[in-house]
Image (cartoon, coloured by chain):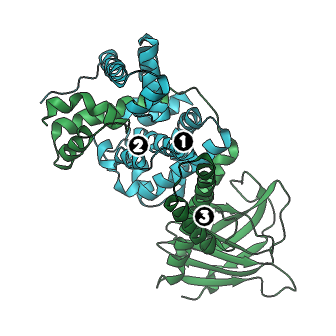
């Protein structure tokens, strides 16, 4: 499973062709996208909702959305994998928020991260196993409270005030933990955010 | 705010939890094509994708792949009152939102309706594809099953740019581990799989295979019964054969 994933992701023109075929509404192309990213998307959604049946429903919804919105991706510069995972995560968080009675306004924020234009000229090979290992290692290096806030933000979609209520900590403390954790991740991953 | 002030909020924006006014400011910068914020948000989205890929490994059921392909038209399970149900679900959804979804009971009901609504979305998508084929000026059609006392009967509609639509009745119920598979049969070449579908309880079925079709080189559309995972080539005698040679434009 890993080798085809790497071959398909490392700046591969085959992925560009896959996007173009999706845009021509070739169902076989969707099958190939599922073979590449279905397992990752399912693992992510299951981590969020912790229910296999619901996770499968949400992954189905994810790929239906990929099918319907593939036209907005740039066939030669789009990054399919990160886009699919963003859609999967958003579907899962949206579900979690609806079952927990959290506000729907949050769903609008999530949708903002699905715009295909944001995935233009993104590094195609971002999801290779080495990078994933690096982020896991970076997470393990975080202090427990910092790791917790990152996980609450990513896997539960909690805002900082919601984290504050859940963890029983002042909002200022939560913001400090979040800021420190994200800075540490940025440093560990060598992600240099450009300055103005 | 300038980009320097926003840079610490890129990750929060990528996670969908940025607060105002930073969220609105980042959105505005992106809308104006700000290269600095664009690059910063992209990198934050890359980190978010890596966090997603770091979730504990899990394997979905083999059926999920088939369900997904079915939802885009490679399989059809029946239509029934899909439109009515979808409208009813939408109305219930609106009512639930109107009266507030603050307590868990409403939230759970809403979640259940959302799942049902999602299923209906796949049906509506297939209906849209079917209407596009039926209404296409270059669509040709062919009938099948008219000569026997109680065979599967029906028609296939083939549009060179939109795909193939099969409408059938009197289909026998398939065994639990079997499924119908449609084939495009080229002249002088091996059959090409064209999707899996199931019939409804009354023996009717509608199946759409979206995509382009070279009508000139296609001899017929056929249907066989196969194992539920489908087959690369037919393994049983076709239940339906609709010859396109006699198709009428």
Residue A181 % position (x, y)? 36, 18
Which residue is tagged 2? A83
Work out how far the residue at label 2 is from the one at label 3, CA to CA, in angstroms: 24 Å
Residue B79 % position (x, y)? 67, 71
User: Which quadrant of the structure image shows residue B208?
Assistant: bottom right
B158 sits to left or right of A179: right
Q: Nearer the viewer, mark 2 or mark 3?
A: 3
Work out how far the residue at label 1 is from the one at label 3, CA to CA, in angstroms: 21 Å
Which residue is tagged 3? B120
User: Which quadrant of the structure image shows residue B119?
Assistant: bottom right
Q: How many neighbours does mark 2 have within 10 angstroms: few (below 14), some (14-19), or many (20 or more)? A: many
Do discs 2 and 3 share a chain?
Answer: no
Is the residue under label 3 in contact with that under label 2 (CB below 8 Å)? no
The quadrant in which the N terminus of chain B is found is: top left
User: Which quadrant of the structure image shows residue A187?
Assistant: top left
Q: Nearer the viewer, residue A89 or B135?
A: A89
> How many numbered circles does the render carry?
3
Work out how far the residue at label 2 is from the one at label 1, CA to CA, in angstroms: 20 Å
Residue B29 % position (x, y)? 18, 43
Q: Callout 3: residue from which chain?
A: B
Which chain did the renderer colour green?
B
B197 sits to left or right of B235: left
């Amino acid at each position: 499973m890993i080798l085809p994933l790497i071959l398909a992701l490392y700046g591969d023109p085959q992925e560009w062709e896959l996007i173009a075929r999706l845009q021509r509404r070739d169902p076989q192309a969707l099958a190939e996208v599922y073979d590449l990213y279905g397992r990752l998307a399912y693992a992510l959604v299951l981590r969020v909702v912790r229910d296999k049946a619901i996770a499968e429903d949400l992954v189905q919804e994810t790929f239906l959305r990929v099918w319907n919105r593939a036209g907005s991706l740039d066939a030669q510069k789009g990054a399919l994998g990160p886009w699919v995972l963003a859609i999967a995560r958003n579907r899962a968080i949206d579900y979690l928020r609806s079952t927990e009675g959290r506000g729907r306004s949050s769903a609008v924020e999530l949708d903002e991260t699905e715009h295909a234009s944001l995935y233009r000229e993104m590094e195609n090979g971002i999801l290779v196993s080495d990078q994933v290992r690096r982020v896991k290692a970076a997470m393990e290096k975080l202090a427990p409270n910092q790791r917790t806030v990152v996980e609450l933000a990513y896997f539960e979609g909690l805002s900082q005030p919601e984290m504050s209520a859940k963890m029983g900590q002042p909002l200022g403390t939560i913001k400090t933990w979040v800021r420190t954790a994200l800075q540490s991740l940025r440093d560990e991953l060598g992600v240099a955010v450009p300055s103005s | 705010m300038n980009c320097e002030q926003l840079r610490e909020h890129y990750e929060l924006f990528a996670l969908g939890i940025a607060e105002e006014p930073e969220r609105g400011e980042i959105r505005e910068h992106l809308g104006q094509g700000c290269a600095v914020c664009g690059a910063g948000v992209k990198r934050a989205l890359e980190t978010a994708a890596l966090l997603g890929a770091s979730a504990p490994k899990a394997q979905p059921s083999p059926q999920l792949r088939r369900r997904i392909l079915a939802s885009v038209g490679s399989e059809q399970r029946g239509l029934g009152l899909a439109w009515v149900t979808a409208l009813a679900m939408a109305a219930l959804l609106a009512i639930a939102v109107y009266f507030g979804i603050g307590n868990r009971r409403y939230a759970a009901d809403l979640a259940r309706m959302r799942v049902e609504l999602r299923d209906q979305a796949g049906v509506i998508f297939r209906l849209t594809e079917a209407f596009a084929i039926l209404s296409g000026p270059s669509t040709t059609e062919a009938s099948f099953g008219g000569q026997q006392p109680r065979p599967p009967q029906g028609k296939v509609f083939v549009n060179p740019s939109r795909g193939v639509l099969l409408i059938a009745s009197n289909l026998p119920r398939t065994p639990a581990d079997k499924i119908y598979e449609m084939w495009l049969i080229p002249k002088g070449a091996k059959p090409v799989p064209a999707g899996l579908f199931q019939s409804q309880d009354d023996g009717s079925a509608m199946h759409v295979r979206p995509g382009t079709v070279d009508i000139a080189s296609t001899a017929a559309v056929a249907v066989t019964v196969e194992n539920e995972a489908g087959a690369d080539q037919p393994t049983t005698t076709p239940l339906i054969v609709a010859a396109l040679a006699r198709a009428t434009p």
